[in-house]
Amino acid sequence: MELFTESLTSYLESHTDPETDLLKRINRETYLKETRAHMLSGHLQGRVLSLLSKLKSPNTILEVGTFTGYATLCLAEGLQAEGKLHTIDINEELEDRVRAYFDESPYAKQIDYHIGNAMDIIPGLKGPFDLVFIDADKKNNINYYQLVIDKVPPGGLILIDNVLWKGKVLQEDYDKQTELILELNKQIAADSRAEKVILPLRDGLFLIRKL
């Protein structure tokens, strides 16, 4: 089930602020070089992440799942002048290319890029984190959420990507991956520690505000 058609996406992007030249290049090179390029946030979602970050004006950001760094740089646009963004990814093969993108950006000195298992790294990060973006392996989404919720101060934001899972959450027959996402959505919807809403943006973005 395709929630966002190509024509709708094109229309929305044409009425949205443009990408920077660096983001355009990351987008293009990701689709040229990566087999799972669809994991990239892309133009529309990237501008949403940027705007949410600017509205929050965070001093500290945590991103779980760097991939090629597109969303990282979008989130960094809202950082305070002395702010810090921690981003975690397990794929060391992308490290050199992603670090080069970060070094080319205005936020090079504000980004701490961690390579390794997020389940091991998150507990060692001090926080607090004003903004968290979770976009990594879906089987651990609920674990990441539970690890970060106490590191987010009241009023802080947690964003979780892919919570509509290409519309599979609406189907009667679903696989194990979809079942995990359904359980994640159910648990967060029932969490009294936060107010929350799912935005039907691209593949579904959970927007959660810590109370």
Image (tube, helix red, strand yellow):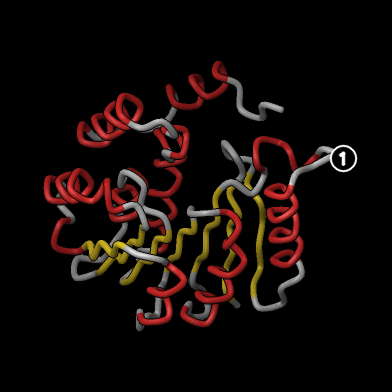
Please state the horizontal and vertical placement of residue 4, each as a whole percent of the image: 61, 27
Instruction: Give the residue displayed 25% in from the left and 61% down from the top.
Output: 113
Please state the horizontal and vertical placement of residue 188, each as a whole percent of the image: 69, 66
Instruction: Give the residue displayed 64% in from the left and 49% down from the top.
Output: 163
Q: Badge 1, how many Cα within 10 Å: few under 14, some, many 20+? A: few
User: Residue extending furthest right?
Assistant: 172
Q: Quadrant of the C terminus?
A: bottom right
Three-letter code for the amino acid on which mark 1 is drawn: Glu
Camera-side residue of 92 and 181? 92
Residue that numbered label 1 is attached to: 172
User: Residue extending furthest front?
Assistant: 93
Please state the horizontal and vertical placement of residue 32, each as a whole percent of the image: 31, 24
Please state the horizontal and vertical placement of residue 200, each as a whole percent of the image: 64, 41
Q: Determine whether, in the image, residue 9 is placed left or right of residue 167.
A: left
Instruction: Give the residue displayed 51% in from the left and 20% down from the top.
Output: 11
Q: Determine whether, in the image, residue 15 is placed left or right of residue 188.
A: left
Camera-side residue of 116 and 88? 116
Secondary element at tag 1: loop
Q: Determine whether, in the image, residue 16 is placed left or right of residue 177.
A: left
Vertical order, 13 against 156 (above or below): above
Q: Quadrant of the N terminus?
A: top right
